[in-house]
Image (cartoon, grey):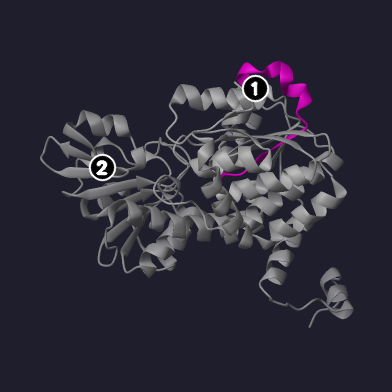
Amino acid sequence: MSDHDVKDLGLAPAGNKRILWADRHMPVLASIRERFEKEKPLEGTRLSACLHVTAETANLMRTLNAGGADTLLCASNPLSTQDDVAASLVQDFDVKTFSVNGEDNDTYYAHIKAAIEHRPQITFDDGADLVSMLHSDYSDQIPEVKCSMEETTTGVIRLEAMKNAGALKIPVVAVNDADSKHLFDNRYGTGQSTVDGIIRATDILLAGKTFVVGGYGMCGRGLASRARGMGAHVVVTEVDPLRALEAAMDGFDVMSMTEAADIGDIFCTVTGNTTVLEKRHFEKMKDGAVIANSGHFNVEIDIDSLKEISGEVNEGVRDYVDEYILKNGNRVYLLGKGRLINLVAAEGHPASVMDMSFSVQALMAEYTVKNDFEVSVHKVPKEIDELVAALKLESMGIEIDTLSDKQKTYLESWEEGT
């Protein structure tokens, strides 16, 4: 391959407009980019990123470039790429970009190979596909990689599994677990963008519908809250007793997916696990049920078993909507081929929330260059988490209190009681 593989460079002007619009809503990242341009903390660093190729990601790549990095970007999902953004990254911002919306699996993995063959010293991942391929097919390059950043819950789960199995050979930072990331990006970003994707794909009215949320992590919390705000009756399913209890005390009906399958109008999985919706659930669903996924991979819905119990499949009855007519006569509508509906049918998280997530990513790239890590899965340092939150508050015009010397002394001591 050359230094890019995008759909059409002629789309660059439209992508440029989209990137600059997002930039207006990412003031924290813009302030970091301004400093990076002056200080060049990433000078001479080769960096490969496997992320969703969106306008927000483009502004992260611009920031890394401003810091002096030699950057390459590929897609972390075959259906989430904004082709005009990919074109503009190549044409206007000097980012090697390998990403085409709708690319097949072979092309998807060829693009990840291109990212690894860039011989990165730092990697950014969204689901750990790049790191997984690095370990399995390019183990000779592992000594060259100083650290990797993981953006998603699913990716952190995979990397923890690698660590526990003794398979992990490089240091990884769980950017997803930073408070300034998952408390906002996962909850508010996923919540809003998932509802947006479902509505764009179906034009369905949520008010009065029974909306089943599979999983009550931060993404599930956000989705349940937003669906309720649109007037839906929300049901939550869980396997974790503490999260299930929290959902119940947040005012949602909590039940098993088997129970929910009987009553749901819309189902959306956000667990990071596999086969959350499977054959026994499809067979119980009412005629016209809508199913979607907003977890990372397309394994949360067992599409193969859905095909097995269907007498007829009509693809593309609407954009991103496939109709499965079950042998019992009921219709089930699968959205976005079971992939991330908020990125397939909508535009992903709003820029203002990605501002924090990508600011953490940029600052961690700088931190990685300046510090060494042992092989493990690491947390984002508290000072970076708090800095990003403070900068975001400042950009919103919000001032907060600070501790007085007396209060600091009180918190640091144990002698003083009532």
The image shows residue 124 at horizontal and vertical percentages of 66, 38
Query: What's under tag 2, amino acid-wise?
Result: His
Q: Nearer the viewer, residue 140 or 62?
A: 62
Residue 255 position within the rendered picture, expressed as x and y whole percent measured from the top left:
33, 55
The answer to whether one can see residue 414 in this image is yes
The image's mark for residue 281 is 2
- Precedes in sequence: disc 1 or disc 2: 1
Q: Residue furthest left?
A: 329
**Magenta span has 339?**
no
Q: Is residue 285 above or below residue 22?
A: above
At x 28%, y 67%, the residue is 207
Give how far across and how far down residue 278 sits, in percent. 30, 37
Q: Which mark is residue 247?
A: none
Residue at 57% x, 44% y is 152
- What amino acid does circle 1 point to? His
Find numbered disc 2 in the image and state the secondary structure of the residue it sits on.
Answer: helix
Q: Mark 1 vs mark 2: give the one in front.
A: 1
**223 is higher (above) or lower (below) than 173:** below
* Residue 380 can be seen in this image: no
Going by the picture, which residue comes out furthest to the bottom?
Answer: 418
Position of 360 with respect to 43 (left or right) is: left
Mark 2: few/some/many CA within 10 Å (<14, 14-19, 20+): some
Viewport quadrant of the C terminus: bottom right
Q: Residue at x 77, y 38 (%)?
A: 69
Query: In the image, which residues are magenta?
Result: 134-153
Question: The residue tagged with tag 1: helix, strand or loop?
Answer: helix
Give 164 or 4, whichever is nearer the viewer.
Answer: 4
Examine the image and state in which quarter residue 377 appears. top right
Above or below for 286 versus 105: below
Closer to the camera in the image, 283 or 80 = 80
Question: Which residue was labeled with disc 1?
Answer: 135
Q: Viewer-proximal residue, 67 or 198?
A: 67
